[in-house]
Image (spheres, helix red, strand yellow):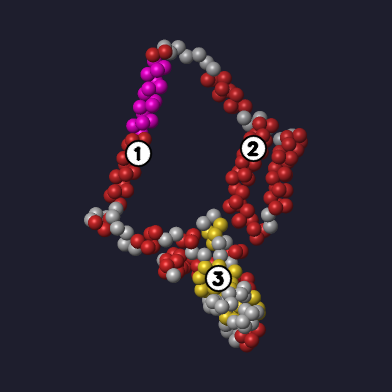
């Protein structure tokens, strides 16, 4: 590969890399990829196509187009029959696949009247995305979802007292550091209300807090416990 072509390839790839480096931090890479993967894929396809054209890798496309320009001795009625045959073939394939899919669905369903009534109707009707707050680890937590997943950055703890509802602060609980068997590698924290004095101790540190809360939310969704919370 000669130098001019290498320069072209570099100028195609470099802007995309600089754009990602400028916008995305390392800890936000997953969130950025989920949000912008379509645009990134489009940019890489365009850059790859231009680079392949400059390198001469797409010459076979021109040869293929020239091959299609060759004349074919076929009467009009033969061409019409060919088009009709293609349409019939596609229709038959679609009908067969649709019938097989419907037959497999019916075979997988149990027989009897219980087939028409779900075993747990409230669990079926409840939408997990409506589950946005709950009492977890002694505090009232609220959160939101992004791409149908729990957004850990949106997790906020509030005082569970109905007369307070103040946002809780996170404080290091050095008093419990006297037990090295439980807290050897981390400093435990507690959630403290600056308004009414409420506090609740947690058995993990700052860096684990949001992850542990998110995992508890996922567990309650997976087990169906969230349905009772939506009923309240």
Give me the residue at 32% from left, 44% from top.
Answer: 102
Spatial CA distance of label 3 from label 1 is 48 Å
- The numbered mark, 1 or 2, whose residue comes first in the sequence reads 2
Is residue 85 one of those drawn in magenta?
yes
Range shown magenta = 78-93
Tell me which corner region of the image, top left, top right, bottom left or bottom right, holds residue 90: top left
Of tags 3 and 1, the one toward the viewer is 3
As drawn, the label of residue 97 is 1
SS state under label 3: strand
Instruction: For residue 116, say whether it is visible.
Output: yes
- The numbered mark, 3 or 2, whose residue comes first in the sequence reads 2
Tell me which corner region of the image, top left, top right, bottom left or bottom right, holds residue 6: top right
Would you say the magenta stretch is mainly helix, strand or loop?
helix
Q: Residues within 10 Å of mark 1 (few under 14, many from 20)?
A: few
Of tags 3 and 2, the one toward the viewer is 3
Instruction: For residue 212, say whether it is visible.
Output: no
Q: Residues within 10 Å of mark 2 (few under 14, many from 20)?
A: few
Is residue 104 one of those drawn in magenta?
no
In percent of width and height, residue 166 lies at 61, 75
Residue that badge 2 annotates: 46
Tell me which corner region of the image, top left, top right, bottom left or bottom right, holds residue 48: top right
The C terminus sits in image quarter: bottom left
The front one of 115 and 182 is 115
């Amino acid at each position: 590969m000669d130098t001019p072509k290498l320069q072209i390839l570099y100028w195609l790839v470099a802007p995309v890399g600089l754009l990602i480096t400028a916008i995305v931090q390392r800890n936000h890479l997953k969130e950025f990829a989920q949000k912008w993967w379509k645009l990134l894929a489009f940019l890489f396809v365009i850059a790859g196509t231009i680079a392949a054209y400059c390198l001469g890798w797409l010459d076979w496309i021109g040869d293929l187009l020239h091959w299609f320009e060759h004349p074919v001795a076929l009467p009009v009625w033969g061409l019409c029959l060919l088009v009709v045959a293609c349409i019939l073939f596609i229709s038959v394939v679609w009908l067969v696949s649709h019938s097989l899919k419907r037959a497999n669905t019916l075979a997988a369903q149990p027989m009897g009247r219980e087939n028409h009534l779900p075993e747990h109707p409230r669990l079926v009707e409840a939408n997990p995305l409506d589950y946005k707050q709950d009492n977890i680890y002694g505090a009232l937590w609220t959160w939101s979802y992004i791409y149908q997943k729990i957004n850990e950055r949106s997790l906020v703890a509030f005082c569970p007292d109905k007369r307070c509802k103040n946002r809780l602060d996170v404080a290091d609980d050095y008093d419990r550091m006297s037990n090295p068997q439980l807290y050897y590698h981390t400093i435990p924290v507690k959630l403290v209300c600056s308004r009414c004095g409420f506090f609740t101790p947690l058995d993990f540190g700052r860096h684990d807090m949001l992850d542990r809360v998110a995992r508890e939310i996922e567990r309650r969704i997976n087990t169906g416990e969230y349905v009772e919370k939506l009923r309240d």
